[in-house]
Image: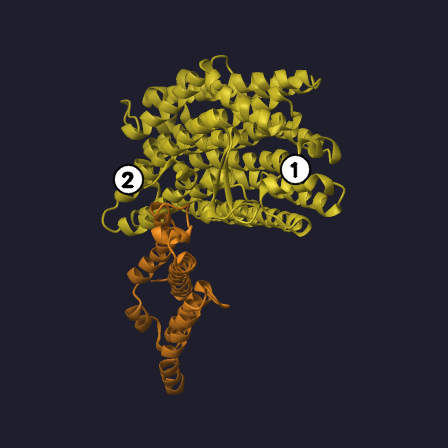
Chain colours: A orange, B yellow
Amino acid sequence: MKEHIVIRTVSRLLIPFIQLFALYVIAHGDISPGGGFQGGVIIGASVILYVISFGMEDGRRRVSESISDFMNSAGVFLFAGIGVLCILAGGAYLEYTAFAGKAAHGEHAEHALHLASHLGIYGIEIGVGITVAAVMMTIFFETARHEDD
Amino acid sequence: MISAENLPILVIIIPLISAIITPLVGRIHRSIGWLVALLATSLSFAYSLALIRSVMENGPISYWLGGWEPPWGIEYVVTPFNGFVLCVVSFITIVITLYARKSIEQDVSESKIPFFYSLYLLFFTGLMGIVITGDIFNLYVFIEISALSGYALVAMGRERDALIASYNYLILGTIGASFIVLGIGYLYMVTGTLNMADLSARLPELYDSTTVRSAFAFFMVGLSLKLALFPFHIWLPNVYTHSPSTVSALMAATSTKVSAYVLLRLMFTVYRPEFVLTVVPVTKILLILAALAIIIGSVIALAQTNIKRMLAYSSVGQIGYIILGASIANQTSMTGSLMHIFNHALMKGSLFMVVGAMVYRTGIVNIEDMRGMGKKMPFAMAAFTIGALSMIGFPFTVGFVSKWYLAVGALKADMWYFIPIILLSSLLTAVYFWRIVEAIYFREKSEKLAGLPSEPAEAPFGMTATTLFLSLLCIVFGIAAFIPTKVAAAAAKLLLGG
């Protein structure tokens, strides 16, 4: 579809907004519908749209194999790592309120606990988003690849 | 800092994180992947040992994920029953990891090795998760983690048939998993809870409900598929035959055992013993299937010409033993069944490792070509002989211990007719293993073997040493049987609600 000027212009225009929307979905995942999975799928879809309109080679130049492989692992690592940080902070695995530390017993205890669990969920949503986006891309690149290369 | 209370989650999270970083560090150097795998499995084993020690002294441990109180949150539970299985699985996996390094260099293409170890660790994470979790949906998630990585591991075999075997396994495994998740859905529908302990408290008053009964039927069929209980075993021989040697050994030693664990856990701790024994007497059906598995598995094994396939059919028979002991359901037979989970892991693990070593050095998989192998690979064949004796149930080997418990258990339950079945199957096992032992020691070299250099050539040290180690354990625990028996008896008592 490289010769279709309309498709190329429209996707060039849309992709930044699609990705911005994806970030919005991820960022608001902890308090409203949406979250890491949905946001990650949207990011992945934006890359797929790019590849459809500009071709495999161009797409792989933007998102190389090593980058998507790295993202595959990095997202899960972020998720699991936050869990381990909770243990290190003295809580159970994924017990975000442990991040509040001493503030959990101070005068703004409720606020501190709230903030801590928000931050924790935020972190894992970002992790989920990264991995889902990368897996979407990987699956697309792998299935779209020609058998001979 | 990391304290003792967090051990239950660390058993899972260490291999999980290692699985994620393996493909990344594997880019730096190929062998780092193996090192990470070894480190992760060793840590898991050390923590499992610490857990079982603490459980035997201070009673069950419950761990709340994210600090959420069960039944709302996910709970990890360690009892003597699953602590025992945790130790068995992680121990066998360490030994196989040590064995894997050389074997995998030959079996899997070089660029895929980091991914192999990543999947290997994920598979291990899934198995450990299945065993430790106290939440039935979490159980399903872990079943899928281990199954999906299992399919990919099988497909890594060099032959084309590996892909077909993996595909069949994928289809049947997915059907099994769907049945399990349907069962979980039905239980959730009527009880509104997913926590196993909570379920077991709520279910008795609903035992008459058709929903609860159909859920149970779904669990039985789904798990029988995963377990490869006769007649649901058709995926298993191809998988064991065509996957890389390490994967055959790992799966034979751990994954069907863990499925057996799940079956017992659901039958006796989610549903109660009185449900499976009297309300819906499923144990009667299982007894028949187990007896058929024992006999037919042995008979088909007798007819095989490929050694890996023969061992696979022999596994079908051995799974029958585990289910037989569990379905007789008295203290002695249940102890025997649990012991057999451990003992069969040792025996079948070491036998598949011998075959892997033989394939590594000579490429021989046909029984016919194994003639005269005793002179070529004396240590590996010694390990094979010990494994074979143990499979037959020779005294002073682990095979004898569990068969003894099963036979005594059957007598105590007035089911004497299972004793001839156990004897007949032992006889058949003796026939199909002894023809090999005879061939490797007392026959002239086969043409294929004569074509190779005549001096003894063992597989690399790491492979031979681990294989011998496992087979020696078959004797050690055959004589010092009281160590695992103590834990298994405590676990059996727990399962039967004593």
Residue B121: quarter of image: top left
Give the residue number, with chain letter if any, for mark 1. Answer: B271
> In the visual, does B106 lie left or right of B313?
left
Q: Position of residue A123 (x, y in %)?
A: 37, 59
Residue in front for this viewpoint, B404 or B169: B404
Q: Quadrant of the C terminus of chain B?
A: top right
| Farthest-out residue, left | B28
Residue hosting label 2:
B35
| On screen, residue B267 above or below B174 | above
Q: Which numbered disc covers residue B323?
A: none
Q: Position of residue B402 (x, y in %)?
A: 54, 20
> At 66% across and 45% down in the image, what residue appears?
B218
Residue at 43% of width from left, 58% of height from top? A110
Type of amino acid under label 1: Tyr
Could you tell me residue B251's position as x and y percent? 46, 37
Q: Is residue A82 visible?
A: no
Q: What is the chain identity of the residue bearing mark 1?
A: B
Residue B398 horizontal/vertical position (percent): 48, 19
Mark 2 burial class by Cα count in 10 Å: few <14, some 14-19, many 20+? some
Q: Nearer the viewer, mark 2 or mark 1?
A: 1
> Tag 2: residue type?
Leu
Front one among A120 and B168: A120
The residues tagged by marks 2 and 1 sit, at their Cα atoms, a distance apart of 42 Å
Which quadrant would residue B451 be assigned to in this image? top left
